[in-house]
């Protein structure tokens, strides 16, 4: 998502309508789905472990439907980010980060609704990037400890594509 993108969503769950999730953008919808998954995980945790110390204190068998007192159990959330820039820095120039780990970081960022990955890929200390342009290939691949500690153009494209789809 871009920094100015609307990520607002509304999520309603209740006994009359199983799930209603609305958003004006795909990224708002993704944020709402993440919230729904977090609610489901909390309810499963309560049902499996019998915990009652979380924010919601419904047993899994009570959702959706009626609480033990007979009142309707409902959930209504309208949410949007307070800050446009919510992210982390990964310094692959100094500490090589394998692409599968970068993918996992991106997926976890989406789970907690972070939207900016500052990927510090190159600097004066290290340049672990294989360049395809013949005029640029004379730039040294610095500080790559092993051949598998470099990023190909395909690997970078994969990370960028994955980030744009989360």
Image (spheres, rainbow, N blue to C red):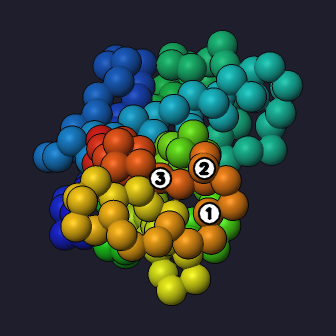
C-alpha gap between disc 2 and disc 3: 9 Å
Q: Residues within 10 Å of mark 3 (few under 14, many from 20)?
A: many
Outermost residue toward the left in this view: 24
Residue appearing at x 73%, y 45% in the figure: 54
Q: Quadrant of the C terminus?
A: top left
Cβ–Cβ under 8 Å for marks 3 and 1? no
Q: Position of residue 125 (x, y in %)?
A: 58, 83
Q: Is residue 68 visible?
A: no
Q: In the visual, does 21 lie left or right of 83? A: left
Cβ–Cβ under 8 Å for marks 1 and 2? yes
Q: In the visual, does 152 lie left or right of 112? A: left
The disc at residue 98 is none
Q: Is residue 54 visible?
A: yes
Q: Is residue 27 above or below residue 20?
A: below
C-alpha gap between disc 1 and disc 2: 7 Å
C-alpha gap between disc 3 and disc 1: 10 Å
Residue appearing at x 67%, y 67% in the figure: 95
The disc at residue 147 is 2
Local SS, label 3: loop
Q: Which residue is mark 3?
A: 151
Outermost residue toward the bottom in this view: 124
Q: Which residue is mark 1?
A: 144
Q: Position of residue 153 (x, y in %)?
A: 34, 49
Quadrant assignment, res 44: top right
Q: In the visual, does 151 lie left or right of 149? A: left
């Amino acid at each position: 998502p871009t920094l100015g993108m609307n990520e607002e969503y509304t999520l309603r769950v209740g006994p009359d309508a199983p799930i209603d999730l609305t958003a004006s953008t795909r990224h708002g919808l993704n944020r709402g789905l993440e919230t729904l998954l977090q609610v489901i995980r909390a309810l499963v945790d309560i049902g499996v472990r019998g915990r009652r110390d979380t924010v919601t204190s419904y047993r899994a068998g009570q959702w959706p439907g009626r609480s033990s007192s007979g009142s309707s159990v409902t959930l209504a959330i309208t949410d949007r980010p307070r800050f446009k820039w919510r992210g982390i820095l990964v310094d692959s120039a100094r500490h090589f980060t394998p692409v599968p780990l970068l993918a996992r970081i991106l997926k976890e960022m989406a789970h907690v609704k972070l939207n900016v990955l500052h990927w510090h890929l190159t600097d004066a200390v290290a340049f672990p990037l294989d360049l395809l342009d013949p005029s640029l290939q004379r730039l040294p691949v610095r500080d790559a400890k092993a051949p598998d500690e470099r990023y190909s153009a395909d690997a970078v494209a994969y990370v960028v594509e994955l980030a744009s789809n989360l």
